Image: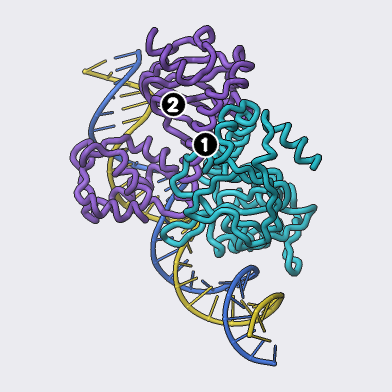
Chain colours: A purple, B cyan, C yellow, D blue
Amino acid sequence: MDRIEAWSRELFSFDVRPFLEERVFAPGEFILREGSFPQHLYFLTQGRAKIYTTHKNGKVSLLNFPAAPDLIGDMELLEVRRESLCVQALTRCHFWVVDSRRCLPQLREDPKFLWFLCNHIARRSARQSTVLTIQQAYPLKNQLAAFLLMASEGDCYRQRHTEAAEYLGVSYRHLLYVLAQFRKEGLIRREGPEYRILDRAGLEALAAG
Amino acid sequence: MDRIEAWSRELFSFDVRPFLEERVFAPGEFILREGSFPQHLYFLTQGRAKIYTTHKNGKVSLLNFPAAPDLIGDMELLEVRRESLCVQALTRCHFWVVDSRRCLPQLREDPKFLWFLCNHIARRSARQSTVLTIQQAYPLKNQLAAFLLMASEGDCYRQRHTEAAEYLGVSYRHLLYVLAQFRKEGLIRREGPEYRILDRAGLEALAAG
DNA sequence: AAAAGAATAGGAGAAATCTCACAGGACAAG
DNA sequence: CTTGTCCTGTGAGATTTCTCCTATTCTTTT
């Protein structure tokens, strides 16, 4: 297949195709399970997934919402994680899967791939630390304003509140509470199953902190 | 110098010494300033520093407490960060500084170095995501218990509360409040300028969540 | 169509956390 | 020795966020 060849030449110095396999996961299906120790690199080429972990007190923390194109299983390849996370498809997900156990020697010697990997992990790490510090420094009001702007199409916001709450790391109840506040303040309006942004400038002011 | 040669052979395939320089920073001195864009890799060989960022609302978030041996400036080398962070020496800090701008071509082609870098960044990223999820899932009580155990020597805890509060991402007032609770519950006792751990098992139970 | 399971919505009260204000002690600079 | 600055410690009240509970709607499965 042509696309695969072009892609593979862009990321690898060696011919990765012998170690490559295509896989598709249905919505809700598990790509990695908590506690498993995968020996593969998953290149997400289509679809969205979620990465989360469950704590001893039962709470669930959503770490990331990978969307194509993204890479899953890199942390496990590098063996930096004692407890692996749970990765679950949200929509139908297409992957190119590299059997990293079998070609680890080539990967470790491949500067093209390693440079890509460094950049990839570093970018994700930077995003995470931004999230971490913003969560420490601002209440939900500010984060939600930013999220509404980011997740809306035009003036129309229609995300699942359950997912949004997990993404923002806050209880479902509290998310609703702050949404209701926004409504009272005339920033948004409910229109059946979706929300409409009425005062974009107001939200932007909040989002800026 | 012998140590440098051994170290350099361990991390690099090429001879990095022409690009290398030793530097020492005094306590309180800035290694990187907010907004600067460094072109160097700083290998911390002795000492402790702190990495933080200041938000628009004036709050300060402490991202990390690098301690020797550690690496600073990698994210900037990879150009993944729009706003650079502030890095400040806590104790006297010794560095081996690599002029990464001048030897970037060699670095990009060096699988030994890139493999090290991947592992380093991945490890830090894993630590950060653990912190992120724990902060979302547990109140300060649990995190503080873990921190007391981690930061004490023997049964003796003597950290600056101002620093601890920033590290835990919580207000100074609230930190003191929870410390006072611990005292009431007989977990710790104040002894002049330091705190003594009375009930290690109790703290461990809290820390485990 | 009926039943089961999510997602939505909100009330009430409690817990966690923050801001502000104040006061005393430690320590360095003048 | 005095002054300024930083760390410590605490009170009071406000805000943010959580838990638990109860309905209603919407989807999916049977």
Question: Residue A71 vs residue C9: left or right?
Answer: right
Q: Amino acid at mark 1?
A: Ala
Residue nearer the viewer, A196 or B53: B53
Q: Residues within 10 Å of mark 2 (few under 14, many from 20)?
A: some
Chain identity of mark 2: A
Residue B139, x across and y down, in percent: 55, 50
Chain identity of mark 1: A
Residue C19, x across and y down, in percent: 44, 67
Residue at image point 70% right, 58% down: B91
Q: Quadrant of the C terminus of chain B?
A: top right
Residue at image point 46% right, 55% down: A137
* Local secondary structure at mark 2: strand
Residue B11, x across and y down, in percent: 69, 33
Residue nearer the viewer, B182 or A102: A102
Residue nearer the viewer, A14 or B153: A14
Residue A70 disc label: 2
Can residue B134 be seen by looking at this rendering? yes
Q: Amino acid at mark 2?
A: Asp
Question: Residue C2 vs residue A29: left or right?
Answer: left
Number of the front mark, 2 or 1: 1
Q: Name the residue carrying label 1.
A: A122
Residue A170 disc label: none
Is disc 2 in the same subunit as disc 1?
Answer: yes
Q: Quadrant of the N terminus of chain B?
A: top right
